[in-house]
Image (spheres, rainbow, N blue to C red):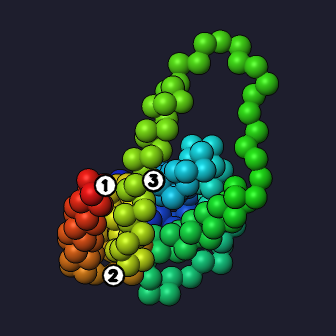
């Protein structure tokens, strides 16, 4: 059994995963990390952590199921994972909007989590940021989510979106400039 030398691209891991258990484990670990980070951002207002973990699990299962028949078609493996994650997120978002969130009956200990007020402030700030991001074109919004919130490198983002790194940098620069303008306009509107 071969060892996995890091950093290895997801595409290389995917090609070795069918015959190498270590490569398969590393591939699934990295896919899961990517899916959790992306899902946390996209599901923020729906109770991100539990749902993000669920999405990541489903993405890993889908990737594992697809590995035996996966064929590279000129796009990086990251783009394949990104498409799966986007579809799983859409399913979870639809389900979250339909039903209530279950809660524990009675807590057994003191709740050390943020207060309702602190949570409300954080959610309000996140909602403002997300609403401002909706003023951006879809491609720029996705680039900012992948680069800033998920923490992908420019190269990883370019691979995931099927773009060049230069195009990602330019789009990110334009998106951040547009967000600054939207923030100034929003603050001017709040003062008036």
Is 93 in front, or is 160?
Answer: 93
Tell me the residue at 25%/65% (across/down).
185
Tell me the residue at 45%/53% (across/down).
127
42 left or right of 176? right
* Nearer-N-terminus badge (1/2): 2
* Nearer-N-terminus badge (1/3): 3
Residue 72 percent coordinates (x, y): 51, 82
Q: Which residue is mark 3?
A: 127
> Is residue 77 something that shows in the picture?
no
Give SS at disc 1. helix
Q: Which residue is mark 1?
A: 190
Q: Nearer the viewer, mark 1 or mark 2?
A: 1
Residues tagged 1 and 3 counted as in contact (Cβ below 8 A) = no
Give SS at disc 3. helix
Q: Residue furthest bottom?
A: 73
Is 77 in front, or is 109?
Answer: 109
Tell me the residue at 60%/13% (across/down).
110
Mark 3–mark 2 distance (CA, rounded to whole Å): 28 Å
* Nearer-N-terminus badge (3/2): 3
Which quadrant would residue 169 be assigned to in this image? bottom left
Residue 159 vs 17, above or below: the answer is below
Mark 1–mark 3 distance (CA, rounded to whole Å): 16 Å
Mark 1–mark 2 distance (CA, rounded to whole Å): 37 Å
Residues tagged 1 and 2 counted as in contact (Cβ below 8 A) = no
Which quadrant would residue 181 be assigned to in this image? bottom left
Residue 14 percent coordinates (x, y): 51, 67
How many marks do you count on the picture? Answer: 3
Q: Residues within 10 Å of mark 3 (few under 14, many from 20)?
A: some
Residue 29 percent coordinates (x, y): 52, 51
68 left or right of 181? right
Q: Which residue is mark 2?
A: 163
């Amino acid at each position: 059994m071969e060892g996995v030398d890091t950093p290895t691209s997801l595409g290389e891991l995917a090609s070795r995963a069918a015959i190498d258990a270590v490569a398969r484990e590393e591939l699934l670990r990295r896919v899961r990390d990517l899916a959790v980070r992306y899902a946390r951002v996209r599901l923020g207002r729906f109770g991100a952590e539990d749902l993000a973990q669920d999405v990541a699990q489903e993405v890993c299962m889908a990737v594992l199921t697809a590995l035996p028949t996966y064929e590279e078609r000129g796009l990086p493996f990251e783009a394949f994972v990104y498409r799966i994650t986007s579809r799983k997120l859409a399913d979870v978002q639809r389900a979250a909007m339909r039903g209530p969130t279950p809660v524990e009956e009675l807590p057994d200990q003191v709740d050390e989590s943020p207060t309702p007020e602190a949570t409300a402030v954080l959610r309000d700030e996140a909602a403002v940021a997300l609403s401002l991001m909706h003023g951006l074109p879809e491609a720029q919004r996705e680039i900012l989510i992948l680069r800033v919130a998920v923490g992908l490198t420019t190269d990883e983002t370019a691979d995931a979106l099927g773009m060049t790194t230069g195009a990602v940098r330019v789009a990110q620069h334009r998106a951040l400039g547009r967000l600054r303008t939207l923030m100034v306009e929003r603050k001017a509107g709040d003062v008036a």
